[in-house]
Image (cartoon, coloured by chain):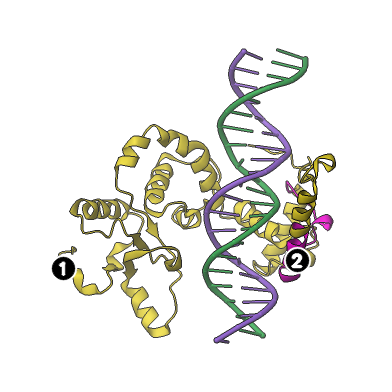
Chain colours: A yellow, B green, C purple
DNA sequence: AAGGCTATCAACCGCTTTCTA
DNA sequence: TTAGAAAGCGGTTGATAGCCT
């Protein structure tokens, strides 16, 4: 879709919490609490930028040109101070997003190909709504693009298969340990070595498998391996071994528990 | 032609995670 | 070790195009 880059966004209206005439003492008490909370919140958390001084909405061609030129000359990073340095009336987050999702030279234009679509579906099946991780497996595509594509096209497309999907065991790979309760995880040999050496967390994919998949149910384990097998085009699994609480449960020779 | 409705997707927001001093 | 800053992430919003009546 082509947006008119010169049309201002007429959004973010000040919506009153209640009509003045319909407010009661109770409403005012609630409002006081709300304002108090907001004041405390403001003391703790500073806004990333002053909204009234910033351009918002669709980027103009001129803004794009300024941002692109600046990043080509000075490189990415330091997004918070970038707008000031580059002479843009945008907040740093907005600049970052615009660069990552639109201006970056390696962005792939055009429709999602059937191969890409297939990969998105498979990865989503594996990873869930981890758009940035999915995007990393699709060169030139952004997480935002994939997320939109999923929410608009694929969700509908797959809806008629809903019952089929529902009947399958849910095997979602979680990638951030604090967010999941898992028994089973996968880690590359390289990663283990590095972690042992540096005692740091590996940023690359170190997926853990949801507890459903970690059950002793043979069918679920087979499904899991099927899923991994279908993805080996995209992942280099030669270097990956499963670890399961203690590794002893896994037979690396037979590739099974 | 006009108005309503829907689909799309860029951009925003709030929160979490990671980095750094 | 800790607090604040920076970066990253995913859900949501809203402008716009296009279709339908």
For numbered disc 2, what is the local secondary structure? helix
* Residue carrying label 1: A253
Quadrant housing residue B2: top right
The front one of A215 and A135 is A215
Which residue is at a point 75% across and 66% down the rendered structure image?
A42
Residue A234 shown left or right of residue A16 in the figure:
left
**Circles 1 and 2 on the same chain:** yes
Dot 1 falls on a residue whose secondary structure is loop
Q: Quick check: is A47 in the magenta stretch? A: yes
Is residue A187 in view?
A: yes
Image quadrant where residue A197 sits: bottom left
Q: Which residues are magenta?
A: A34-59
Expressed as whole percent of the image width and height from the top left, the position of residue A152 reads: 52, 38
For the point 29% across and 48% down, which residue is it?
A: A169
Task: Check disc 1: other Cα within 10 Å, few if <14, some if 14-19, many if 20+.
Answer: few
Q: Position of residue A52 (x, y in %)?
A: 83, 55
């Amino acid at each position: 879709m082509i947006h008119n880059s010169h049309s201002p966004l007429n959004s973010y209206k000040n919506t009153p919490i209640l009509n003045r005439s319909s407010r009661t003492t109770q409403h005012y008490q609630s409002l006081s609490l709300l304002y108090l909370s907001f004041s405390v919140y403001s003391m703790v958390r500073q806004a990333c930028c002053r909204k009234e001084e910033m351009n918002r909405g669709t980027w103009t061609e001129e803004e794009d040109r300024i941002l692109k030129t600046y990043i080509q000359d000075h490189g990415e990073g330091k997004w918070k101070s970038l707008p000031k340095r580059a002479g843009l009336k945008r907040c740093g987050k907005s600049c970052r997003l615009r660069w990552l999702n639109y201006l970056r030279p390696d962005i792939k234009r055009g429709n999602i190909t059937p191969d890409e679509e297939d990969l998105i579906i498979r990865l989503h099946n594996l990873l869930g709504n981890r758009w940035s991780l999915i995007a990393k497996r699709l060169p030139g595509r952004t997480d935002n693009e994939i997320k939109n594509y999923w929410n608009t096209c694929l969700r509908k497309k797959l809806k008629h298969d809903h019952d089929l999907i529902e009947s399958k065991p849910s095997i979602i790979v979680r990638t951030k340990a604090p967010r999941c309760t898992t028994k089973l995880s996968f880690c590359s040999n390289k990663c283990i070595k590095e972690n042992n050496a540096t005692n740091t967390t590996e940023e690359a994919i170190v997926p853990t498998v949801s507890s459903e998949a970690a059950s002793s149910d043979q069918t679920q384990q087979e499904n899991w391996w099927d899923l991994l097998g279908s993805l080996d085009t995209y992942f280099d699994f030669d270097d990956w071994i499963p670890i399961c609480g203690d590794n002893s449960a896994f037979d690396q020779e037979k590739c099974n528990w």
